[in-house]
Image (tube, helix red, strand yellow):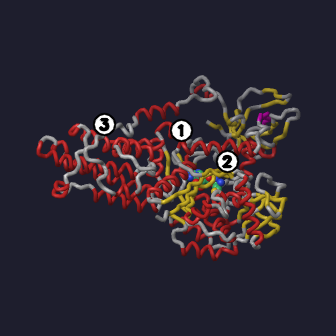
């Protein structure tokens, strides 16, 4: 038989931060696709890894007082350790600091350089250090980088450029003639609309005077390679391009998984790089949306960066994988909250799947001591008792959805079948059939169809919940041969549970989660102690003794011999005052002049470093950093603040 091959990749993740929910999602989505393709008879190769060069990593390492290599080793290991936890079966984990990868990047650069598509030129442009790239003015929002919300800096340098513009028309044509190249449709439209504007050539080098942590250009020792030109090559270096067996076997069937943040490098740079190097273009790009947590973008400052290890510890890996696949419509953004995962576990997993499993097998125990009686084909036909057609329909719908990465629909097809099984139980009332001896063959037929239905469900959930699939199959007494799953063809063939076999009493697949306990837990989290501890309670009268007034800073200067204090002259409306404020570490004098502030105006005069202080300005304190409190709108100095 001619085996079909498919290659799946995730982005290689930056090692400047620890793995979170978003990274776990892409890896799980690609793993689900891989396992599904295996069921569909494909031989697969799954690649993931870490992206370790560039400014971002240098900065992160500096913050930790370590070297980029040591830092990369540590974080890369966290990404590697996560894979078995989320049940992702990778065939290779690549690191861009791997020697073999570095060699291939150099080879590719030389090839494109020799063909004349890389040239040297001087360039002045707007550079965002966060993105490690130059920006066009029209790409900025209010003059700022859309991702980092900071104004890029003007930089002038001589660099190497890749002639992307030369391939613009070719790329547009390639995207239009290969409808499956970028999926889902909205991202294809986004790339095509971007390509309506003239494509700039890509700056693919960074001078070593600015950055050394990268791959040295093979044709100029004074430069390192731009991190994206290095990173994208991982997809072929991992397969042993150009002559490796894996490359020959798997490259023609490549599907990359990425989120919407990196469609440009994948949808534009990468195909053009391949074209320029004379390599076949990859097969397709699957683009998904972003996970927000509790309605906001994950961010350290909000404190909502979700660690997949924690969620799995709490709810289990299969519930986590199920939730991610069921909740996100591939291509759109989704929201993660503890309430929604618990509600999915309780309704879909405990109630629907868990319940139908234990309901059917418990009845088979109650009526037949666990023995599978088998279906009587005459009864089945005459009473229209076969569930085979519903099962077949579920498999077809499942397959169609999974091929298009519509995971929520794939899951939906299985759950529709579960609901059909529940309806079948309600209509056929096994408990009524059991009351009359002459109906026992009908009861046997009904239960056989239901048990076969459970077999089918256990096979179809495999890509999403491999452990639960195995647990169900162990109970049902079926075991795939030489692999850990049943193929779609095997799943399709109705009647595989052996007549006369004994099925054990079912275990509970997913225990219900006590929502009340969850609420208590949330409250406990919310009432964690203040740091520093709250001061003794005061009355409104106590507070009224403090006279707060608006003021404007007129003058500010440093106090000699103190690195903490600034001497301020402030306008309090009725009078001008001198205030000595401990803000010199966080504010330069020129930064604070003209600022509207709030002053404790009735504070007893004091002397600090020999200078009189006639009041105090209010400031918030976070991790020893001070931020002066101001007012929302401009207001004349001297007005009371309550
Ligand atoms: N190193 C580059 C990729 C190079 S690939 C040749 C990079 N790394 S990254 O660490 O920033 O990873 C970005 C990817 O992580 C996204 O494309 C997506 O796969 C995943 N996610 C990161 N945050 C995410 C969400 N909040 N939601 C969903 N996935 C997101 O870019």
Could you tell which of marks 2 and 3 lies nearer the N-terminus? 2
Tag 3 residue: 505
For this orientation, the residue located farthest to the front is 1
> Residue 125 or 477: which is nearer the viewer?
477
Q: Quick check: marks 1 and 3 in contact, CB under 8 Å?
A: no
Q: CA distance from mark 2 to mark 3?
A: 47 Å
581 in magenta:
yes
For this orientation, the residue located farthest to the top is 536
Could you tell which of marks 2 and 1 lies nearer the N-terminus? 2
Question: Magenta segment range?
Answer: 577-582
Percent position of residue 521, x then y: 47, 32
Instruction: Please say whether residue 329 is visible from this viewpoint.
Output: no
Tag 1 residue: 310
Tag 2 residue: 15
Find residue 210 and report its image quarter. bottom right
The residue positioned 78% from the left and 38% from the top of the image is: 585
């Amino acid at each position: 038989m001619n085996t079909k091959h498919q290659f799946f990749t995730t982005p290689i993740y930056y090692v400047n931060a620890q793995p979170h929910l978003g990274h776990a999602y892409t890896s799980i989505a690609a793993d689900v696709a891989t396992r599904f393709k295996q069921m569909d008879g494909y031989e697969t190769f799954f690649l993931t890894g870490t992206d370790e060069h560039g400014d971002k990593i240098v900065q992160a390492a500096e913050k930790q007082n370590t070297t980029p290599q040591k830092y990369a080793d540590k974080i890369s290991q966290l990404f590697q350790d996560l894979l078995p936890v989320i049940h992702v079966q990778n065939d290779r984990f690549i690191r861009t600091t791997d020697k073999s990868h570095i060699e291939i990047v150099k080879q590719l650069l030389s090839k494109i350089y020799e063909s004349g598509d890389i040239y040297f030129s001087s360039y002045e442009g707007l550079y965002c250090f966060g993105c490690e790239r130059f920006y066009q003015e029209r790409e900025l929002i209010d003059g700022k980088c859309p991702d980092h919300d900071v104004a890029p800096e003007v930089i002038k340098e001589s660099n190497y450029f890749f002639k992307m513009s030369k391939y613009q028309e070719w790329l547009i044509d390639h995207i239009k003639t290969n409808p499956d190249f970028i999926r889902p449709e909205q991202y294809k439209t986004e790339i095509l609309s971007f390509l309506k504007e003239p494509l700039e050539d890509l700056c693919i080098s960074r001078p070593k005077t600015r950055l050394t942590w990268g791959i040295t250009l093979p044709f100029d020792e004074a430069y390192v390679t731009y991190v994206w030109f290095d990173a994208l090559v991982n997809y072929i270096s991992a397969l042993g391009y150009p002559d490796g067996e894996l490359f020959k076997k798997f490259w023609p069937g490549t599907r990359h998984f990425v989120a919407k943040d990196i469609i440009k490098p994948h949808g534009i740079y990468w195909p053009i790089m391949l074209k320029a190097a004379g390599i076949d273009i990859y097969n397709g790009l699957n683009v998904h949306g972003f996970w927000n947590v509790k309605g906001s973008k994950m961010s350290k400052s909000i404190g909502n960066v979700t660690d997949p290890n924690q969620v799995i510890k709490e709810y289990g890996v299969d519930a986590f994988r199920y939730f991610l696949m069921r909740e996100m419509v591939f291509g759109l953004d989704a929201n993660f909250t503890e309430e929604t995962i618990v509600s999915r576990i309780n309704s879909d997993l405990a109630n629907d799947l868990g319940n139908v499993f234990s309901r059917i097998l418990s009845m088979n125990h109650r009526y037949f001591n666990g023995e599978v009686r088998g279906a009587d084909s005459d009864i089945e036909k005459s009473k229209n008792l076969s569930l085979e057609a519903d099962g077949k329909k579920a498999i077809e719908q499942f397959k169609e959805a999974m091929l298009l990465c519509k995971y929520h629909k794939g899951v939906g097809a299985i759950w529709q079948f579960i609901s059909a099984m529940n309806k079948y139980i309600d209509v056929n009332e096994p408990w009524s059939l059991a009351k009359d001896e002459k109906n026992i063959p009908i009861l046997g037929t009904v239960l056989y169809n239901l048990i076969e239905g459970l077999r089918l469900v256990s096979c179809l959930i495999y890509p999403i919940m491999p452990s639960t699939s195995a647990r169900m199959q162990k109970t049902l007494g079926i075991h795939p041969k030489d692999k850990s799953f049943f193929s779609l063809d095997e799943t399709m063939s109705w009647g595989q549970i052996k007549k006369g076999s004994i099925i054990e009493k079912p275990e509970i697949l997913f225990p219900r989660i006590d929502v009340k306990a969850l609420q208590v837990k949330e409250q406990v989290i919310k009432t964690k102690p203040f740091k520093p501890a709250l001061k003794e309670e005061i009355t409104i009268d106590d507070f009224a003794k403090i006279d707060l007034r608006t003021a404007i800073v007129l003058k500010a200067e440093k106090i000699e011999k103190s690195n903490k204090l600034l001497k301020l002259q402030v306008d309090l409306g009725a009078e001008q005052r001198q205030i000595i404020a401990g803000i010199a570490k966080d504010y330069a004098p020129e930064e604070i002049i003209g600022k509207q502030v709030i002053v404790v105006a009735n504070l007893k005069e004091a002397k600090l470093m020999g200078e009189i202080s006639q009041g105090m300005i209010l400031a918030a304190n976070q991790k020893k950093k001070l931020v002066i409190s101001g007012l929302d709108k401009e207001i004349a100095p001297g007005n009371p603040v309550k």
